[in-house]
Amino acid sequence: MTARLITLPLPAASGVRADGTTWISLGDPAKPPHMQFDGPPCAKAAAEIVRTINAAPAAVDALKAVLTSLRDPDADNLLPNAATEKVVAALAAMGERS
């Protein structure tokens, strides 16, 4: 089974403990499923990871909408094949089939 970024429990959050170590939390700690893990070694990296995870569902929806529009024979839009392939690759990287 291929993991899909958008199937992770959301929202994601990060923080720094009093001892300076960082953590990332996925999902609501009061309800399953919830995951929490230590790291990465700096708060800035943890925040970037969390931002990317939280943005994934919207990014997948946007990329799917672009492909749907491009594949619509009645739509009047054009995207170079190389750009279309990048959209397909981005979806694949997030575990989505297009």
Image (tube, helix red, strand yellow):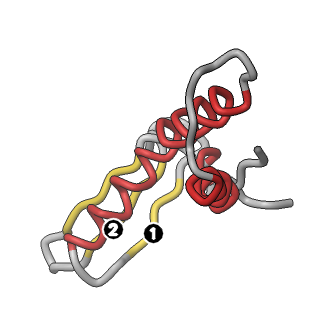
Q: Secondary structure at mark 2?
A: strand
Task: In the displayed orientation, state which residue is furthest to the top.
Answer: 74
Point out residue 79 in the picture as x, y percentages from the top left corner.
Answer: 56, 43
Badge 1 local density, few (<14 within 10 Å), some, or many (20+)? few
If the image is split into quadrants, where does the N terminus sit?
bottom right
Give the CA separation, mark 1 to mark 2. 6 Å
Point out residue 47 in the picture as x, y percentages from the top left corner.
Answer: 27, 62
**What is the total number of numbered labels drawn onto the structure image?**
2
- Asked if disc 1 and disc 2 are in contact, CB closer than 8 Å, the reply is yes
Badge 2 local density, few (<14 within 10 Å), some, or many (20+)? many
Quarter-wise, where is residue 42 in the image? bottom left
Quarter-wise, where is residue 68 in the image? top right
For the point 47% across and 51% down, the residue is 26
Judging depth in this view, the residue of 86 and 24 nearest the camera is 86
- Report the amino acid beneath label 2: Trp
For the point 46% across and 37% down, the residue is 30
- Report the amino acid beneath label 1: Phe
For the point 33% across and 53% down, the residue is 51
Check disc 2 and report the residue beneath it: 23
Check disc 1 and report the residue beneath it: 37
For the point 21% across and 71% down, the residue is 43
Point out residue 54 in the picture as x, y percentages from the top left corner.
Answer: 41, 45
Point out residue 32 in the picture as x, y percentages from the top left corner.
Answer: 59, 40
Q: Where 13 falls versus 89 (above or below)?
A: above
